[in-house]
Amino acid sequence: MKFFEEWLWQYYGARFFLMFDNYHRAAEALHLSLNINSRFHRGLVSLGFIYASLQQYSVAARYFEDALSINPQDAKALFNLGYV
């Protein structure tokens, strides 16, 4: 049995890169994660946050909207969508 699925490893790798403000590497890891598990809600919200931080607001909004299509009650995604 696997301890973590590959998509989850990629997510935690992205969080590591975010600690060092390496948004581009974090985005790469999250895209890999979502290629494996496209319905990974936290990955979508995290990508939205990254693109908002990079001032790519329309891209960020798309990821927040995708996350909300999976979990419409997510307060972070709703707040961040309103921000961008």
Image: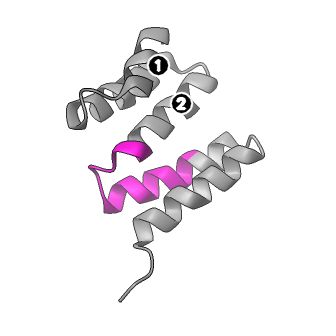
Give the image quarter of residue 78: top left
What residue span does the magenta drawing correspond to?
27-43
Q: Position of residue 39 (x, y in %)?
A: 26, 49
- Give left or right: position of 42 versus 23: left
Residue 22 visible in image: yes
Closer to the camera in the image, 3 or 58: 3
Residue at 35% of width from left, 89% of height from top?
1
Residue 4 place in picture, x, y as percent: 44, 74
Compared to residue 2, the image places residue 79 above or below, namely above
Residue 35 to residue 78: above or below:
below
Q: Residues within 10 Å of mark 2 (few under 14, many from 20)?
A: many
Kindly state the secondary structure of the residue where label 1 is placed: helix
- Mark 2 lies on a secondary structure that is helix
Q: Do residues under tags 2 and 1 come within 8 Å of each other at their CB atoms? A: yes
Specify the amino acid type for callout 2.
Phe
Q: Residue at x 34, y 44 (%)?
A: 41
Q: Which mark is residue 4?
A: none
Instruction: Say which residue label 1 marks.
Output: 80
Above or below — where is 80 with respect to 1?
above
Toward the viewer: 55 or 5? Answer: 5
How many marks are shown on the rendered structure?
A: 2
Give the residue type at disc 1.
Asn
Residue 29's quadrant in the figure?
bottom right
- Circle number at residue 49: 2
Vertical comparison of 44 with 61: above or below: below
At 45% across and 25% down in the image, what residue appears? 60
Would residue 42 be counted in the magenta stretch? yes
Label the magenta part by its dominant secondary structure: helix
Q: Outermost residue toward the bottom?
A: 1
